[in-house]
Image (cartoon, rainbow, N blue to C red):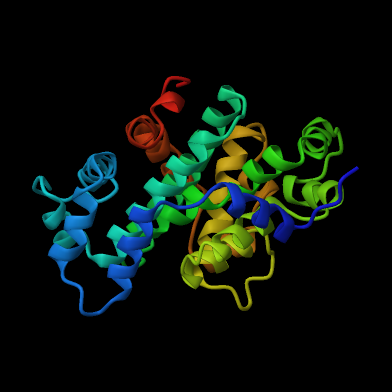
Amino acid sequence: MDVMDAMDYAEKAEEIFVLSDSYIRIKDLIDDEASTIDDIAEVIILDPALSGTMLKLANSSLFNYPGKIDTISKAVLVLGITEVYNLVVAYFITDTFKSLKLDADFLDEFWASSVDCALILTFLGTRLKVQNAERLFILGLLHNLGELLVQQFNIDNYKRYRSSKDKYLPWVKQQKILGCTFADCSAELMKLWQLPFCLVEPVRYQDSDDFQYSTLETQLLYIAKRVMLKNTLYDHKPYTFLINEKKLQALEINEELLDEATYYCDMERLGILAVLNPGASMIY
């Protein structure tokens, strides 16, 4: 039986799944304070698939922009550099993992649950008046990349995890069977890809019950992930089966708001899946 830790999975993934030159050029421009909106737009325009995806997302319900965003320059101007960077990350990472030799149904379900978490997280952030709540979408989308890594690089242990009848919660079962969690693997890969600390840290601590030192983004990801799991794996259980009621109260979140987040997710899922992963939208 192969024993691998989170870094092992991340390093194997980094060897195989390299983010494209376009991503690196865009990241360099965004990091360069001397770059202009036109400089960034010009590089994005060179990639038709990226341009199309970005415009579709910019005009989606994620942003609710009152007018139509019909050029990349306008998208950068209206959404801001940070959000454009997040959309670029979302595009290139989802595109990178489309080359995985995995069961199509598994991949479709994986991306659907990732989008669900992202939508729930964005909705909660918006309702709680978190500044630029749209940026939370990327956290939800990337929170579980580690599952893909374990499935790809240690299929025997992954099958043990999936077939286990233990009644532990998923992240506890992952730790017991795999020696690390999907969150650990996700964070290590994101770190190797040099994604911002503000993305890596919430993903790393998404399963931590200790809210004392965690950021608001981490706490909201914690909640959103559990709402998604409640709806997919534990639909007969109350929210409090997965989420301590005191944590909800501390964030001023009640069950009615969680129901609204689920409804929003159900309404918007198809539209977002159709942009990021058209195949997954066919299962709904």
For residue 254, side relative to residue 212 (left or right):
left
Would you identify the image quadrant in which residue 21 lies?
A: bottom left
- Residue 194 image position (x, y, % from top left): 50, 67
User: Relative to residue 32, is residue 222 drawn left or right?
Assistant: right
Residue 227 in percent (x, y) is at 56, 45
Quarter of the picture holding the C terminus: top left
Q: Is residue 126 visible?
A: no
Query: Vertical placement of 154 versus 198: above or below?
Result: above
Q: Is residue 9 visible?
A: yes
Q: Residue at x 79, y 32 (%)?
A: 159
Residue occupying the point 66% across, 34% down: 233
Asked if residue 193 lies left or right of residue 55, the reply is: right
Quadrant where the N terminus lies?
Answer: top right
Q: Does residue 205 sit above or below 225 in this rendering? A: below
Task: Return the residue nearer the eye: 203 or 192.
Answer: 192
Q: Is residue 251 above or below residue 243?
A: below
Residue 196 position in % (x across, y down): 46, 69
Q: Residue at x 10, y 45 (%)?
A: 70
- The quadrant where residue 23 appears: bottom left
Percent x, y for residue 44? 23, 52
Number of labelled discs? 0
Tell me what residue is drawn at x 61 percent, y 52 percent: 15
Q: Quadrant of residue 25?
A: bottom left
